[in-house]
Image (tube, helix red, strand yellow):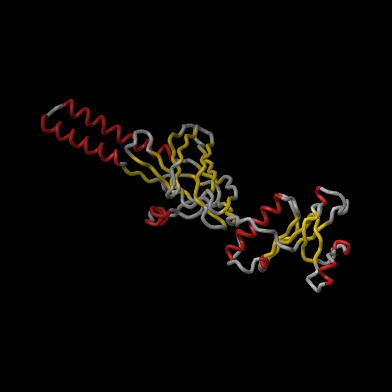
Amino acid sequence: MQTLTLRQRFSLARFLRGLGPESGPVQLDRSRIFILPTATGLLFAIVLLVMLLGAINYANNMGYMFTFLLGSMALVSILHSYRNLAQLQFAAGRAEPVFAGERAAFDIHVGNPGGRPRYAVELELPGETPVSVDVAGGQTARATLHRDAQQRGRLAPGRIRVSTRYPLGLFRAWAYVELDMNCMVYPRPGPARDMPPHAVYRPNRSGDKGRGVDDFAGFRPYRPGDSPRHLFWKAAARDQALLVKQFGGDRADEIWLDWNDLPDLPAEARLEQLCRWVIDADRQQVRYGLRLPGSEQPIDSGPGQRARCLEMLALYH
């Protein structure tokens, strides 16, 4: 837990911007908590002032009693608002990866090491709806905060405002917490498009006889290693490009998803299209690799390969 210096404690920047990202659990002590009256509290103070002036003007003892009673309740509520936040601990939870354009979710663990329950503790990100939690004594509650993920890369939740108006709503106590956590934002998947031609095809062992999965499915360019019996020799005899007959039973066991396969697209559009290909290759359960300028992910398959390739695309610069 971070200890504030005297200069940090009275810094205007801390009041306006907080302390920046902090690792590990963050505990709220008295140097972090601010208290000011709410709009309801200001109205309440005006009402008390009018009551006091009326009691003085008419020398009404009952008016004095009610004025000072209500004023005492307001002063006591300041202490309760402060104690509702004091010593609470905040720790980073999970933040599942999302695609650009989706909503990122950040789990925040709110711990209450004391024995006194805390009520109506609100956590809020700028521009988002506050999330309210109650935390029993000695327990931990979870609050999930959301934020729009507009761009690929690492997305931090930013500064979280923790506040409470408990118990009467006359005063708001608040503090700022910025946890060292982030969510991985993958590129937005591009439109459906044919896979690149850098695939290693394995013909079906049953050959090209019969019907069903072994029916003729068209032609594709010749690649080294293709079986000579599948070559389209008529095209070769006419001095055309060498083609290979492709059958329904043929499948691509390995495929390279290459940045250079998309020369007609700008950089971000290439990343989006490669993202689509990674998703499609994973769905088709083929082994695939990813090539970007200056980096390469070897051919593999499975959820781990999907996550590695998508993260590689998200962090590309």
Q: Quadrant of residue 299?
A: bottom right
Residue depicted at 77% across the width and 63% down the height: 220
- Give how far across and how far down residue 110 sits, in percent: 51, 40
Can residue 311 be seen in this snapshot? Answer: no
Relative to 279, say whether 36 is above or below: above
Q: Residue at x 54, y 41 (%)?
A: 109
Q: Nearer the viewer, residue 260 or 74?
A: 260
Give whichever of 84, 109 is nearer the camera. Answer: 109
User: Residue lying farthest left?
Assistant: 58
Residue under the image location 88 percent in, 64 percent down: 228
Q: Is residue 49 left or right of residue 105?
A: left
Question: Where does the image place residue 87, in percent across and percent down from the top left?
Answer: 47, 41
Q: Residue 200: x percent and y percent?
A: 79, 60
Q: Quadrant of residue 201?
A: bottom right
Depth check: 301 or 112 in front?
301
* Count of numbered badges drawn on the protein: 0
The picture quadrant where one finds residue 313 is bottom right
Give the x, y percent position of residue 253. 79, 55
Specify the farthest residue to the bottom.
239
> On the rendered image, what quadrant is the C terminus found in?
bottom right
Apparent side of residue 60 relative to residue 173 in the rendered image (left or right): left
As drawn, the residue found furthest toward the top would be 62
Above or below 216: residue 55: above
Residue 174 in sight in this render: yes
